Image: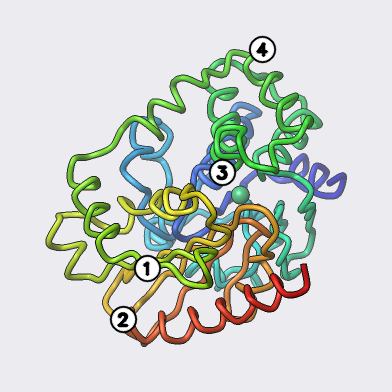
Amino acid sequence: MEEIVKALKEANKVLVVGHIMPDGDDISSVLSMYTALKRMGKEVMPAIDWNIPWIFEELEEVKDIVDYDGFIESGFKPDLMLIVDVSSPDRIGRFAELVEKVKTAVVDHHQTHQKFTDYSWVDSTFGACAQMVLRILEKLGAEYDEKLATLNLMGILTDTGFLRYPNADVRAFKDATKLVERGGKPYVISRMILENKRLEQFKLFSEVLDKMKMEADGLLVYSYITQEMYKKHNCTSDDSSGFVSELRSIRGVEVAVMFMEVEPKHVHVSMRSREWFDLAEFAKSIGGGGHKRAAGASIEGKSVQEVIDMVVPKLVEKLQQEVGVK
Ligand SMILES: [Mn+2]
């Protein structure tokens, strides 16, 4: 952490990069860094090589986020690329091309982190990357107001399921309290993320429930969305990111999985576990990564059904093995 703080102090032009398929913690981490460093008089460019889910558009800083094409067109020449909430270079899209060319630092809380930068601060005991961002910004002497506090708070709330998941420990509550004291508005975030659904999402979810299957004596629940289903309901992968947690909320379920064909023959496998199943380990075995209770993988060149046939029997076997051990 000290090295990253030093590198940030020395840098004048900072490119802050988040991950593809960005979530609330990632967007929070990118925009908190962007807002605070810019106020310190640095030239800062926030970057994510992916579309930003529409629910986040009410944050005015979102329009400043560029993808790789926008970065190239801008001619911006960073002296530091700060990567946040990212466990491996394939997660930053085309920005991976810069890794060997500029000074790089990463701040991450994924258990499956693979070191790929000059400086790295990785600590999987933090529920949210935003908590690590908070510590860096405090070291840099950032001044918090309502805007920065709300941006920073968003990551803590979203990655802890609004302080409901096992990673919502004393430290997460204390960090959240600190940000609320500094003007952060939890209700603005909960309204934006939780109470902002389109009717089409409910219709798509209804079809997801029709297709849902249970395995391993009810320990595993899964469903899927094909490209045709997205089109039929006028939805995109942005609209289905919360579905997997809904499936996990079924009584008795230990693991929930959503198979989503986000682009033709590009299937994103999104997984959540409740109490004991280590998804970080399992995700690695299918070429993905993540945390113990939330992980994923992106598989290209296969249909949804082919991916289901590859993943489900493996998961059932692993679940049954572990139930046997318990
Ligand atoms: Mn995160």
Give the amino acid type for the residue marked by disc 1 in the picture. Answer: Lys
Q: Which residue is mark 4?
A: 181
Q: Secondary structure at mark 2?
A: loop
Which residue bears the numbered disc 1? 213
| Nearest to N terminus: mark 4 or mark 1 | 4
Of all residues, the one furthest to the left in this rendering is 232
Nearer to the camera, 302 or 15: 302
Of labels 3 and 1, earlier in sequence is 3
Which color scheme is applied? Answer: rainbow
Choose the circle earlier in sequence order: 4 or 3: 3
Name the amino acid, label 2. Answer: Lys
Answer with left or right where residue 214 lies relative to residue 101: left
Q: Which quadrant of the structure image shows residue 130?
A: top right
Q: Image check: 209 left or right of 66?
A: left
Identify residue type, mark 4.
Glu
Residue of label 2 = 265
- The residue that disc 3 covers is 25
| Badge 3 element | helix
First in sequence, mark 1 or 2: give its number. 1
What is the C-alpha distance between the residues marked 1 and 2?
22 Å
